[in-house]
Amino acid sequence: MQPTLTDVAREAGVSAITVSRVLNSPDAVRPRTRIKVENAIDKLGYVRNMLAGSLASASSRVIAAIVPSLSNVVFIEVINGLQTEFERHGYQILLGNTDYDLERECQLVRTFLGWSPSALIITGLRHSDACQRLLQQWEGPIAEIMELGDAIGLNVGLDHIEAGRCMARHLLEKEHRRIVYVAAQIERDYRAGLRYEGHREVLQAAGLEAPLLDMNQLGQFETGARALDQILAQHPGASAIHFANDDLASGALLHANRQGIRVPQDIAIAGFNGLPIGQHVTPRLTTIVSPREAIGRMAAREIIVRLEGEHAPHSSHDVGFILRAGEST
């Protein structure tokens, strides 16, 4: 059952009026009291209902979707899949961007749920404790997407650990034995970390080291170029680089061409996501294709089933992935 404003007041040891003041005019409340109320809100998972009176029970035709980035084509394609299916059934999307920040994600969830959306789509399975409580207490349909695991509700995604294993096996089959994995802010982009787990597992099983280079800037072309320079300086014997995404890999490949470094003869380069640019660089990029729009479409279809009242248990859908071997490995 959703906690009420009275529940928050009781937990914080203050009046309901004080809680209301914290929500509406926080600067008018003493900091110590405000902190007590905010802690109670987080502990209980309270969501402020932004729809007053009779509107509170109205049926919303809005579905909230929260993604880590609105500049990354990966998530744009997911959103396109969601939007295509939802619009066919008369629903519109309310978008939120976390910038890979779990605290910002929690703030967005709290705000969106306060507007009583019909359903919620959220990227990933890792959330802050406060966000987890909000999601578990909300009674509407939830879909956690992009990865597989123990989900609160519906789960649509792919196995990132297995994707990492798949690329590592491919590089071993190409007789590479000194392979460096490159990520960018791996603590924030933790699905890249899952792929590294699979990569490391395969290499260690073959008796090989699995060095990791974690760049301090999220995956952009120039970050990939800098990563190539660092690997050539720090791992001069490396024969292959397994990049966490195609942006990094393409940046490194373009930089290699400018520097006269032969790919794959001098060093092999592989990526992840299957972005179009990988098929337009020379040599074509070896990558793993993630079915991004299919994830959006499937999540939307499963949500619609639940909104239309059909019985649908919590379920997990593995959309899989494809290894696309180019000439870069």
Image (tube, rainbow, N blue to C red):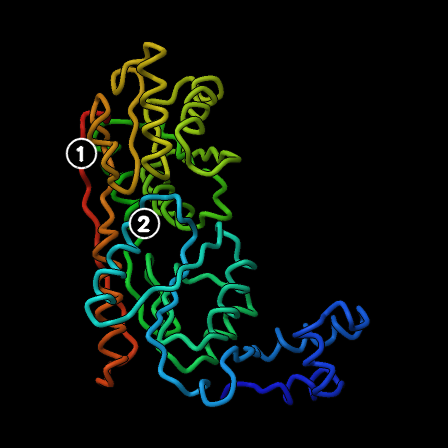
Q: Is residue 122 left or right of residue 127?
A: left
**Amino acid type at image mark 2:** Ile
Q: Is residue 130 left or right of residue 138?
A: right
- Callout 2: few (<14), some (14-19), or many (20+) C-alpha neighbours within 10 Å? some
Q: Which image quarter: residue 267?
A: top left
Which of the two residues, 252 or 23, is positioned nearer the viewer here?
23
**Amino acid type at image mark 1:** Ala
Residue drawn at the location 71% of the way across and 78% of the way down: 21
Residue 77, placed above or below residue 309: above
Q: Are marks 1 and 2 in contact (CB under 8 Å)?
A: no
Q: Position of residue 195 (x, y in %)?
A: 36, 46
Residue 318, placed above or below residue 262: below
Residue 322, placed above or below residue 306: above
Q: Earlier in the sequence, mark 1 or mark 2?
A: 2
Which disc is residue 325 wearing? 1
Q: Which image quarter: residue 312?
A: bottom left
Q: Position of residue 44 (x, y in %)?
A: 59, 80
Residue drawn at the location 32% of the way across and 28% of the way down: 250
Which of the two residues, 149 or 60, is positioned nearer the viewer here?
60
Q: Secondary structure at mark 1?
A: loop
Residue 181, placed above or below residue 228: below
Q: Is residue 323 left or right of residue 177?
A: left
Q: Secondary structure at mark 2?
A: helix
Residue drawn at the location 23% of the way across and 27% of the way down: 329
Which disc is residue 76 wearing? 2
Distance from the alpha carbon under mark 1 to that under mark 2? 24 Å
Which disc is residue 199 wearing? none
- Callout 1: few (<14), some (14-19), or many (20+) C-alpha neighbours within 10 Å? some
